[in-house]
Amino acid sequence: MELLNIVNIDAENLPEAWYLLQQKLWDIDAYEYRVEHGSYPGMLRREFDFVVCRIRRPHIRPLCDIIPHHMSFPPPTTAAKIEEYFNSYILNPLVPENTFYTYGERIVPQVLEVIRRFQIWGFGHAKASVTIAKPEDITALRTPDDPESRASEPCLREITFKMRKDREDNIWRLHMVIYFRVWDLFGGFPENLGGLQLLNEWVVENIGPHPKTGEPLETGEMIVMSPSLNVREHIFNYSKERVGKI
């Protein structure tokens, strides 16, 4: 019986996490399969069986990797694109016409309640999880009379905000635990996590200091996980090139 290979990565910041994960994906005997349904059907996908990545200081700028000029591909994202993604998609509750859902539509109402709870209840509780997926997502149809016209299910499933007091620095930190059901490592990972770091900074700013003690609050670590963090076939050579595998 072949068991799933659980990979653990420990990174200092977001660009390092992105780099180390790609490096690891080509260092190990990662699983490759041809997609039969979903994004890019017929294309090979190389993915981790399950990956957990700890990012100790995700606030460090730049939030995304600076691609060397001699590389043959454009940057998968930039600071400006991350800012736009945060403002227009994560923190925007409006759903455009003919769109099934957005992350912002589901995140914003819940995160406002998370902020309220920390402001009113203090920091000594664990009631701060934001769920992006809904049970009906898996059965929803784009065209009511066509059972194969399935609507897209959210890749991002849950964000848990975890409050801990840093006893060395005597301040509070708001950490994030993030779960993606499927995740594009090359392009999605850096933009998603850059935007979610901006979300954490926005949440911290709106919560403010501890409501009873006045002790300061800052952003903390990210722990991210996925059973399908992957690179698609048309990106294989770009990913290999970035980490010196070709």
Image: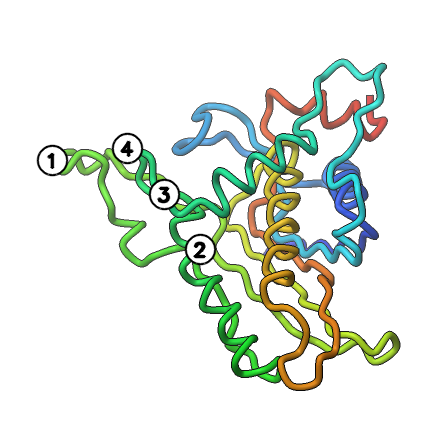
68 and 61: which is toward the camera? 61
Closest to the observer, 241 or 13: 13
The answer for how far apart the CA atoms under marks 2 and 1 are is 32 Å
Q: Earlier in the sequence, mark 2 or mark 3?
A: 3
- In this figure, which residue is indicated by the disc labeled 1? 145
Left/right of residue 59 with respect to residue 244 in the rendered view: left
* Residue wearing tag 3: 94
Gap in angstroms between the C-alphas marked 4 and 3: 9 Å
Marks 4, 1: nearer the viewer = 4
Between marks 2 and 4, how big is the CA–CA gap?
Answer: 18 Å
The percent coordinates of residue 95 (x first, y second) are 34, 40
Give the amino acid type for the residue marked by disc 3 in the picture. Answer: Leu
Mark 2 secondary-structure assignment: helix
For the residues carrying marks 1 and 3, which lies nearer the camera in this image? Answer: 3
On the image, numbered disc 2 is attached to which residue?
Answer: 108
Outermost residue toward the left in this view: 145
Residue 150: percent from left, percent from top: 27, 38
Give the residue type that dot 4 points to.
Glu
Image-quadrant location for residue 92: top left
Q: Is residue 232 above or below residue 167?
A: above
Q: Secondary structure at mark 4?
A: loop
Q: Residue at x 67, y 67 (%)?
A: 174
Q: Residues within 10 Å of mark 1 (few under 14, many from 20)?
A: few
**Three-letter amino acid code at disc 1?**
Asp
Q: Earlier in the sequence, mark 4 or mark 1?
A: 4
